[in-house]
Image (tube, rainbow, N blue to C red):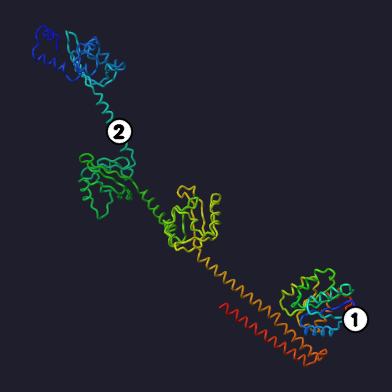
Amino acid sequence: MSTARQEEFEDRTPVASEIMYHDLFELNPQPMWVYDVETYGILDVNQAAVRHYGFTREEFLGMTILALRPETEIPVMLEAVSIVRKHEQLFSSGIYKHRKKSGALIDVLIQGNIVYVNGRKAELVLATDITSWIASEQERTMSEEKFKAIFDHTTDAIVLCDDNGCCTDLNDASRRMLGYETDELRGVCIKDFMHLPDEIGFDGVWKNFLNGEILNGLMQIRRKDGTLITGSFNSKSNILPGLHMCVITDVTERMEKKRELMASERRFKALVQEGADLIAILDEQGNYQFVSESCYPILGIEPSHLVGKNAFDWIHPDDRETVLALFLKIREHRQIRTEPFRFKDGFGEYRWIVTIATNMTDDPAVGGVVANSRDITDAVEKARDLEISNERYRQQNEQLREIAWTQSHVVRAPLTRLMGLVQLLQSGDTAGMPVEMALELIKSSADELDEVIRKIVSKADKVQNDDE
Amino acid sequence: MTNDGLKILLVDDDKIMLFLHDTFLKRSGVLCDTVLCYNGQEALDYLDSNQAMETTFLVLLDINMPVMNGWEFLGAIRDRPYLSKVLIVMVSSATEESEKSRALTFGQVIDYQQKPLTVETCRRIIGSEKLRRFFDNVILE
């Protein structure tokens, strides 16, 4: 408004339009004020400014606009006002920091226009508090940066597609995983590197996906060099209208390790669960923590029946003390080997067992004493049979030795007498013994010899019969 | 001609064998007295009662005998230092080498012969080098 027009209005009753424009200033919901560009003094202020800044109207009118600025902002403000001073007409705008009466700082969008009040150059200012907007903008920017950082730096491949399944954007992980340059993949349909089974058509899968079906699972992905990798994928359609996302994790190595682990577990199962030995893990008190499946075929006891129970309750009372004393040495010796001992099986019979116990309580994967037990009942029984057999042979040998001794002593007694008598007769001089007597002695010696031989034969028969 | 310094004890529970050995011994030409004993105890008693004699005794000793067998007799002799001059020839019907080895572990056993003795055997015993060490003048016919 020009100075001339303003002066004209002061001397007469305002018209309706003037009242309306005054109300537009006074009742405007946005804070407004007018200040003198030479003195910075506030010439007028509306109600919204009073409400928003906390100063009364009188306080405003006694202030300069410098009082609305924090110290650091004053040079900026002075520079802005200096520009206004240089122009007759100027619409200016800018974002500044203001200070309320409470001292709180706010961000404001200042829009100003040059006016003349009582012939003095002034600026009408409209202040819009944009503190919340700036904060939300900063938050939004940070959020975008955060998500961009995730997109760029995640090790998972993130592929964005359009409705046709053509790649519109990919992150660096996609490039590394697939072996393509990013530009090579833009516009390429994902079916070109998805290795679907022959019986599954891409078009049907994609159609269902676009209809809201969430696709996830494992799939084979063909890299640029032709090699196949295994990807765990998770897809979501329409994350934005017409934009679909697929996140792929390369699990090739993990799957390989899983296969190796499974193979290892199968070997473990073959060795531990289905082997001929009974494998168990006990705590240091001898309580079963784990018992292999081989327990049932060996002992006729379900493994679950033993877990939590004390192994020594199954050991024969006569053997228990010895085995317990040895077991207690497991703290001093990493490994102990028992002598054969008796262990009650599921049928109440005792089986002969030998055990090698290894202390693996320090190994967190085991956390106990590993007991490897073998049923040697058959071997023990065979050894016992052999012992009995040996004893029988020993007795036989004793009897045979007795026979030999008898032969040597009992047989030879009449025989030597016979030989001596024959020698005497042969000499032609019986040394006073009548020949008839010598002959009678020969006969009696021969009879004695015959009797002894019969006894020997009878005894030998008896030994043989006893053996049979 | 007799040898007053030597007496031969024939120890056997078999009287016929004693008769035969005594006969064969005399036919072998040895000129000394023989004493017949039917078990080890009789022989031991005889030696005990004649220990004062200036005589050395040769015992032809059977093993298997009642009352005191040959092994028990050997043990008893070993326990009697005053009978250290007694020499022994084992005469047994046993054929085991182990018997012979066992017998020769006794220091006073100079020979081991199987029954029956013959005239020739008796002659070898009497004329043996071992016996000669004790009797420089063992007299044979």
Left or right: A421 as drawn, with respect to A318:
right
Q: Where the N terminus of chain B falls, by quadrant?
A: bottom right
Marking on residue A22: none
Marking on residue B2: 1
- Residue that mark 2 sits on: A145
Q: Amino acid at mark 1?
A: Thr
The residue drawn where x is 29% and y is 43% is A247
Q: Residues within 10 Å of mark 1 (few under 14, many from 20)?
A: few
Q: Amino acid at mark 2?
A: Glu
Point out the residue furthest to the top here. Answer: A11
Q: Secondary structure at mark 1?
A: loop
Left or right: B12 as drawn, with respect to A407:
right
Q: Residues within 10 Å of mark 2 (few under 14, many from 20)?
A: few
* Percent of width and height locating residue A280: 46, 55
* C-alpha distance separating marks 2 and 1: 144 Å
Instruction: Give whichever of A33, B52 is nearer the camera.
Output: B52
